[in-house]
Image (cartoon, helix red, strand yellow):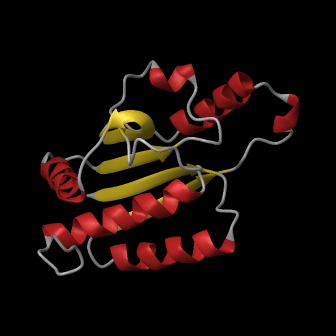
Amino acid sequence: MKITLLLIGKTEYPYLAEGYKLYESRLKHYILFETIYIPTIKNSKNLSTAQQNDKEAEMLIKYFGGKDLIILLDEKGSEYSSVDFSSFIQKNMNKGYKNIMFVVGGPFGFSEMIYKLNLPKLSLSKMTFSHQMIRLIFIEQLYRAMTIIKNEPYHHQ
C-alpha cells in the first residue's frame, strides 16, 4: 500500500518546499509515500485557461492506474475534520488498493476532462488556497492522519 501525491510543477517557494520536505520525511515512518511532479506547461501564456487545463489533464491521466483510488483535491469536494480524515484514510487503506493517489491541479484547477471521470473529491477548506500552498497543508494533514491512526500525541483534541 502506497500513498501518492500527484502535482503539477515543482514547489516554487523555498519556505513551502522546506515545510513539504519536513512532513514528507516524517510520513515515511508510517507509510510508503511518493510525490510525483509533472512538468508545468511550456508557453502557457499562449494558451487559454481551458487549453492549459486540458494539456495538464492529458499528463495527469497517464498516471491513473486501474488498482488505484484516485482522489482530486478540489474546492467542491467532501470536507473532513482531521480525525474523520484519518478514518477515511484507514478505511481506504483496508480496502486493498495498491495506491491511494491524491491529485492537485494546476493554478486553474482541473479540466472538464478530469471532472468527467467522476473521481472522488476532497476539499481541505471552504477557503481557496494556492496550488503551491495546498501541497504543504495536505501533507501536514496526511501526517496528522497517520499519527491519529497510530494513536500518537501529535494531534490534540
Above or below for 111 versus 16: above
Question: Which quarter of the rendering shows the C terminus?
Answer: bottom left
Query: So how many labels did they put on this image?
Result: 0
Q: Compared with residue 74, is residue 142 higher up or lower down, i.e. above or below?
A: below
- Percent coordinates x, y for residue 76 in the rendering: 40, 31
The quadrant of the picture occupied by the N terminus is: bottom left
**Residue 74 or 103: which is nearer the viewer?**
74
- Residue 109 lies left or right of residue 50; in this view the side is left
- The answer to which quarter of the image holds residue 23 is bottom left
Judge by depth and name the residue closer to the eye, 68 or 105: 105
Q: Residue at x 17, y 69 (%)?
A: 148
What residue do we see at 23% from left, 68% from top? 146
Q: Position of residue 133 (x, y in %)?
A: 56, 58
Q: Residue at x 72, y 30 (%)?
A: 52
Image position of 6 (left or right of 124): right
On the rendered structure, is 3 left or right of 82? Answer: right
Q: Name the residue located 82 percent from the left edge and 28 percent from the top edge.
A: 47
Q: Quadrant of residue 126?
A: top left
Measured along the vertical axis of the image, is residue 105 above or below residue 130?
Answer: above
Quarter holding residue 144: bottom left
Q: Position of residue 40 (x, y in %)?
A: 72, 47
Q: Is residue 97 above or below residue 113?
A: below
**Image coordinates for residue 82, horizontal then vertical, percent:** 24, 58
